[in-house]
């Protein structure tokens, strides 16, 4: 008897666009908050608004005429786009540098020659076959949220490159409530996945900060980690099967909940960032919607004591589903930039409790976690934590997706603002934290470097850095690239990963070999040759980029 419910439900298509200050949900920085920031990083001066499309040079499309005709025959004329505005709209991701390239036409983004929007997995496969035949580069595109150059339209050694936009692959294909497995097409966005599952009383529980725009395929292609990964797992932990398009033919993986039938090839394609395959369908583990949730805040005295307390929670199996520890600077800045610390009452209260260097810990619990929470709170109190109740937790929950919008407001004000992340074992975490901070302080003038642990494990944790500085208007892109290079060099070859969840893209490709070794690079190159012998898939990403034209 088959228990799988085939639903064929889909979502409305949406307009593309970046999180911009003038867009929906924009945030404004309070004058008091901006003054607080400038006291720490220096005066910021706005100089370059987003440039109109007409100010950015877009070359004529170089897609061969014969290939264009074949693509039209597959997806329809209205879904092969060569209009400059459509091509510019998929010319990159949402990194600080990506956004700067839309403000400084003298350093324009790499623009694809066309955008193709297939309607289903079969059309994706046929499009790849045409591109392989005509040697056209293909950049798979989901929500476009990459902050490491993962969707930049590089040509590599190709005369032309197109963006394969998967937004029309927007269906929940099936739900198996007995096995708790759902199959999504790759273009379904995070909120839509939750809405479609909620009808069946289920949830995926994967909520990264890019949740509003990012897609199921993007989650899988980058091995995404969500804010509740301590409870629900990272995205690769959720994937039970995949349907893939490759230049060599369609490929399916995952037939059982576990297997010893050779190496797990799902692990090879998950995190491959569109360089080996195009994900068209993803089967994921789902869970019942939680009946209740609880968010709360605690403060610990100092970063060392805070990370020790989180380690004890992780190693005793007491982590909350959401566990986020901010260091001293991030704790202070988050209150200041959100209008907090309006009086000295909280500071005096914490001082009376022996908290000299407040580090804010946010915990979020889903479902029936009463006993686990009780033991976790007992452990935190033993570590000297001061409970602040539900208010800080709810405030974080309400603002959990405002980071990109707040970054855009800071960018508009003339700040250099970007993030980077890594992860290390607990024994190495303090040294990695100090090395990265030191590298950033050495590369930038008077920066504000903030950090938090967003994901914790029995063996270690992630470190997520936010960096703010007054923008160097003479070389704004170079300013950040030098800082990012310094931080990456502080990480690479050490006891830390070059990326915990942002993926590799172009930014981290030069440092991958230091982490996986020359043999590992050769294994990846061999896998690419096997499925993509002409190298059309996402040129210049993951592996060291080929020479560009």
Image: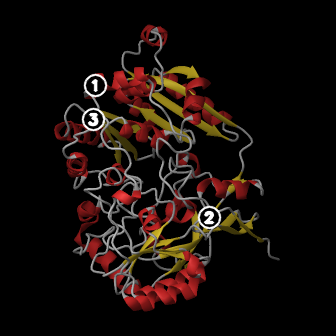
Per the model, the C-alpha gap separating discs 3 and 1 is: 9 Å
Earlier in the chain: of badge 1 and badge 2, it is 1
Location of residue 107 with respect to 421 vertically, above or below:
below
Q: Name the element at disc 3.
A: strand
Q: Nearer the viewer, residue 71 or 440?
A: 71
Residue at (39%, 84%) from the top-left corner?
A: 532
Q: Name the element at disc 2.
A: strand
Task: Tell which tag, 1 or 2, sits nearer the viewer.
Answer: 1
Residue at (48%, 22%) from the top-left corner?
A: 339
Graded by Cα atoms within 10 Å as few (under 14), some (14 to 19) or many (20 or more), the crowding at tag 1 reads: some
The quadrant where residue 61 appears: bottom left
Name the quarter where the C terminus is drawn: bottom left
Q: Which mark is residue 40?
A: 1
Earlier in the chain: of badge 3 and badge 2, it is 2
- Whether tag 3 and tag 1 are in contact, CB under 8 A, the answer is no
Tally of numbered tags: 3
- Whether tag 3 and tag 2 are in contact, CB under 8 A, the answer is no
Residue 274 visible to an observer of this rendering:
yes
Instruction: Name the image colouring.
Output: secondary structure
């Amino acid at each position: 008897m088959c228990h799988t419910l085939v639903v064929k439900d889909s979502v409305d298509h949406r307009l593309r666009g970046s999180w911009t200050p003038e867009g929906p949900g924009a945030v404004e920085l309070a004058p008091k908050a901006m003054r607080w920031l400038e006291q720490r990083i220096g005066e910021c001066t706005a100089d370059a608004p987003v440039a109109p499309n007409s100010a950015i040079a877009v070359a004529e499309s170089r897609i061969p005429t014969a290939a264009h005709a074949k693509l039209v025959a597959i997806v329809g004329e209205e879904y092969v786009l060569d209009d400059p505005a459509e091509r510019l709209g998929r010319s990159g991701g949402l990194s600080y540098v990506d956004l700067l390239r839309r403000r400084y036409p003298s350093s324009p983004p790499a623009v694809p020659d066309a955008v193709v929007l297939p309607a289903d997995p079969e059309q994706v496969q046929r499009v790849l076959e045409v591109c392989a035949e005509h040697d056209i580069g293909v950049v798979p595109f989901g929500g476009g949220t990459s902050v490491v150059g993962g969707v930049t339209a590089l040509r590599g050694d190709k005369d032309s490159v197109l963006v394969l936009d998967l937004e029309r692959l927007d269906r929940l294909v099936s739900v198996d409530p007995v096995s708790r497995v759902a199959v999504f097409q790759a273009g379904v966005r995070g909120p839509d996945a939750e809405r479609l599952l909620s009808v069946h009383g289920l949830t995926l529980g994967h909520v990264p900060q890019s949740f509003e725009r990012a897609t199921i395929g993007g989650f899988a292609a980058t091995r995404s980690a969500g804010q509740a990964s301590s409870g629900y797992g990272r995205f690769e932990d959720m994937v039970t099967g995949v349907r893939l398009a490759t230049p060599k033919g369609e490929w399916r993986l995952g037939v059982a909940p576990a297997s010893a039938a050779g190496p797990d090839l799902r692990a090879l394609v998950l995190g491959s960032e569109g360089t080996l395959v195009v994900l068209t369908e993803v089967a994921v583990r789902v869970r019942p919607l939680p009946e209740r949730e609880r968010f709360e805040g605690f403060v610990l005295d100092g970063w060392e004591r805070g990370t020790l307390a989180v380690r004890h929670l992780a190693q005793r199996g007491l982590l909350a589903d959401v566990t986020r520890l901010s260091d001293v600077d991030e704790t202070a800045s988050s209150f200041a930039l959100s209008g907090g610390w309006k009086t000295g009452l909280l500071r005096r209260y914490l001082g009376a409790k022996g908290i000299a260097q407040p580090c804010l810990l946010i915990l979020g619990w889903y479902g029936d976690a009463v006993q686990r929470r009780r033991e976790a709170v007992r452990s935190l109190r033993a570590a000297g934590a001061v409970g602040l109740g539900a208010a800080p937790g709810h405030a974080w929950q309400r603002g959990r997706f405002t980071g990109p919008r707040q970054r855009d407001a800071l960018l508009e004000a003339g700040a250099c603002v970007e993030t980077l992340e890594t992860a290390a074992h607990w024994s190495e975490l303090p040294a990695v934290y100090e090395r990265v901070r030191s590298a950033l302080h050495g590369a930038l003038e008077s920066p504000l470097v903030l950090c938090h642990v967003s994901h914790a494990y029995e063996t270690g944790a992630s470190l997520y850095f936010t960096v703010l500085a007054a923008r160097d208007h003479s070389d704004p892109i170079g300013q950040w690239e030098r800082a990012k290079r310094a931080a990456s060099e502080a990480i690479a070859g050490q006891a830390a990963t070059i990326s915990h969840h942002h993926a590799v893209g172009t930014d981290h490709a030069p440092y991958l070999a230091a982490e996986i070794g020359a043999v590992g690079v050769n294994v990846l190159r061999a896998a690419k040759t096997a499925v993509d012998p002409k190298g059309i898939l996402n040129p210049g990403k993951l592996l060291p980029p080929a020479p560009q034209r």
